[in-house]
Amino acid sequence: MSRPKLTLRDGRIELFWKEGKLDRYRPVKAEDHRRFDDWISAYRLALNRNSNPEDLLALGRDIYDWIDNDEGWMGALDRAFERSGADGPRLLELAVPENPDEKAIRFLEAPWELIADGRGHLAALDPGFCPVRRIGAAAEGLPAFARPLTLVFMAAEPLETDVHLQYEAEETAILGATR
């Protein structure tokens, strides 16, 4: 099954999802590229100064409003998810062509995980919501192997401290929980 895609290509933004019967597009203007840059800068600033969560929420709402535009793309996307009846994560693929230019890279770099509507961040409201970034066309997946999952343990303990990790106890607890 495919997933919805928000693609920056040939001077336009496209929202496409075959199963969800979505096929919309609009031009991307210079002001849109400036907006991507502003989002990236605002996000970095918020991270560096431990800003108020309301700043990130406002940023997420601005991203939502940009996607939604005057055409209601976010509502259409939500209705398409409902129609599809798909269980599992609500993935939104953000895609650019192979060998992206600087503008396309900035599009991918925007903090899409912060998308928020009037209720809050979509990732907080629906833990299955997940933006996925892609450069170029999707490749065929690798075949699944019929073998048990393996786990590698690696521990690091700070130097010059009186607190010591309990490596074996932690490993035993993880193995017990995962069997």
Image (spheres, rainbow, N blue to C red):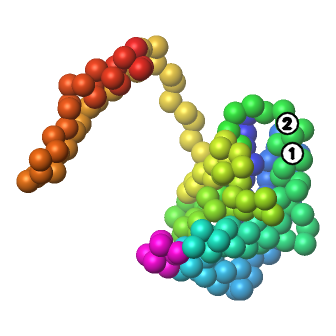
> Hey, what amino acid is under mark 1?
Ala
Determine the residue located farthest toward the left in the rendered image.
160
Q: Residue at x 63, y 49 (%)?
A: 130
Q: Residue at x 64, y 62 (%)?
A: 114
Occupied quadrant, residue 176: top left
Q: Position of residue 73 (x, y in %)?
A: 85, 61
Q: Position of residue 115 (x, y in %)?
A: 69, 62
Q: Along the line of sight, which residue is nearer the eye, 118 or 43?
A: 118
Query: Which residue in the structure is indicated by mark 1?
Result: 80
Occupied quadrant, residue 86: top right
Q: Position of residue 63 (x, y in %)?
A: 71, 69
For the residues labelled 1 and 2, the Cα–Cα distance comes to 6 Å
Report the side of 156 relative to 178 (left or right).
left
Report the side of 126 relative to 170 (left or right).
right
> Hey, what amino acid is under mark 2?
Ser
Q: Residue at x 73, y 39 (%)?
A: 2
Please tell me the numbered disc located at residue 84: 2
Is there a contact, CB below 8 Å, between mark 1 and mark 2? Answer: yes
Callout 2 secondary element: helix
Callout 1 secondary element: helix
Q: Is residue 153 above or below residue 15?
A: above
For the record, the magenta segment spans 45-51
